[in-house]
Image (spheres, helix red, strand yellow):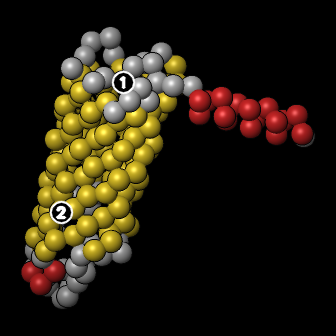
Amino acid sequence: MKITTIFTTLLFFTTMLVGAQNISEHTLGLRLGDSDGFGAEISYQKSIGRYNRAEFNLGWRDSREFDAFKLTGVYQWVRNLDGGFNWYYGFGGGLGSADFENVPNNSRLSDDNDGFFVFAAGNLGIEYDFDIPLLISIDIRPEIGLIGFDGFDNDFLFDFALGLRYQF
């Protein structure tokens, strides 16, 4: 049992220390996801160091209950799995504005709830770096409302997305 625990711990720390083979200086593309309505985001990533980068997304969310735009920034650590496969994790936050539709018999969703919101976000994903300048990723970005109006304040959302980015 001790050998298994030591081996597992050693394997865990070894994978944490293995660095990404290649982080592009810049990437630009789309992040297409779903969290309370389909949304598209223009996504930009900037390398900060050998194993770190910043990601900025400007997006639009559209659902039956509301329309919203948001700006998100995430600091990420990138680790190599094998060849062109990387996994990454990070944290950040953002802000946005929402416009709710009037829903009969639902006081939570009305024009009175329109307004500004601020949120904190985490990020966890996997990506593949092709030999051509294309980066494809699948990730989850859990978000929790910090400041805002009823409907986004203290609300916890999971944002799953597919990213397609051009590397330069």
Secondary structure beneath dot 2 equals strand
Disc 1 marks a residue whose amino acid type is Ile
Residue 51, given in percent of the width and then of the height, sits at 44, 30
Up/down of 19 relative to 77, above or below? above
Label 1 near label 2: C-beta < 8 Å?
no
State which mark lies toward you, 2 or 1.
1
Q: Quadrant of residue 137?
A: top left
Label 2 sits on residue: 96
Quadrant for the C terminus, please: top left
Is residue 125 visible in this depiction of the protein? no
Secondary structure beneath dot 1 equals loop
Residue in view at x 36 percent, y 66 percent = 144
Residue 75, given in percent of the width and then of the height, sits at 36, 44
Residue 147, given in percent of the width and then of the height, sits at 28, 74
Label 1 sits on residue: 23
Residue in view at x 20 percent, y 88 percent = 107
Is residue 112 visible in this depiction of the protein? yes
- Give the crowd class for mark 2: few <14, some 14-19, many >=20 residues within 10 Å: some
Up/down of 115 relative to 56, above or below? below
Residue 2, given in percent of the width and then of the height, sits at 89, 39
